[in-house]
Amino acid sequence: MCAHNAVRSPMAEAMAKHFFGRSVYVQSAGARRGEVDGFALAVLDEIGIDAHKHKPKSIEDLEEWEGLNFDLIVSLSPEAHHKALDLTRTVAAAVEYWPTVDPTAVQGSREQMMEAYREVRDGLMRRIKDRLAS
């Protein structure tokens, strides 16, 4: 879960499904719904993961479509973390906060921006592999 389900959480969802899709059920959502970010898709393409069909959704969308039957909610932004903690009033799920920089804040050349997204991708990949491998 992140702020808009546009960059960090779709990247995390795509990687978790890629590496653990048969053993773990994964869905991403945002505190609010945004638009999928092209740079996020591009850095996933670089490692052979296709997330182009991702449709951003809010946590309310997810609750309406599937219910909130999760054992774990991983929040990646302060706004999402507060929302996740609020959800635990009615949902019996553990919450982990993985503070993750928002790469959309980086200014500069295309390559500088891509590097910021790669850093987020690589950091999320390490955490996902460490957390879900056990």
Image: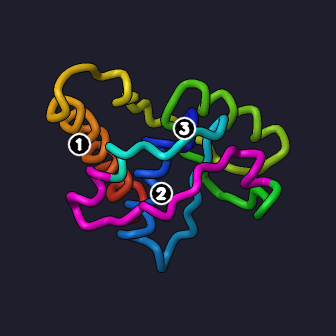
The segment highlighted magenta reads 42-63
Please say if the residues under marks 1 and 2 sit with CB atoms less than 8 Å apart.
no
Amino acid type assigned to the residue bearing label 2 in the image: Glu
Gap in angstroms between the C-alphas marked 1 and 2 = 15 Å
**Image point (43%, 30%), residue name:** 99
Q: Amino acid at mark 1?
A: Arg
Q: Is residue 65 above or below residue 9?
A: below
What residue would you read off at disc 1? 118
Mark 2 or mark 3, which is nearer the start of the sequence? 3
Magenta run includes residue 62 = yes
**What residue sits right under mark 3 in the picture?**
2
Q: Identify the image quadrant of the C terminus.
A: bottom left
x and y, in percent, of residue 77 in the image? 51, 30
Work out whether 61 lies above or below 2.
below
Asked if 59 appears above or below 50 in the picture, the reply is: above
Where is residue 133, by image quadrant? bottom left
Q: Quadrant of the N terminus?
A: top right
Image coordinates of residue 50 in percent, x first then y, are 36, 66
Tally the marks: 3
1 or 2: tag closer to the N-terminus: 2
Q: Which residue is mark 2?
A: 13
Image quadrant where residue 30 sits? top right
N-terminal of the pair, mark 1 or mark 3, is: 3
Residue 32, image x, y percentages? 66, 35
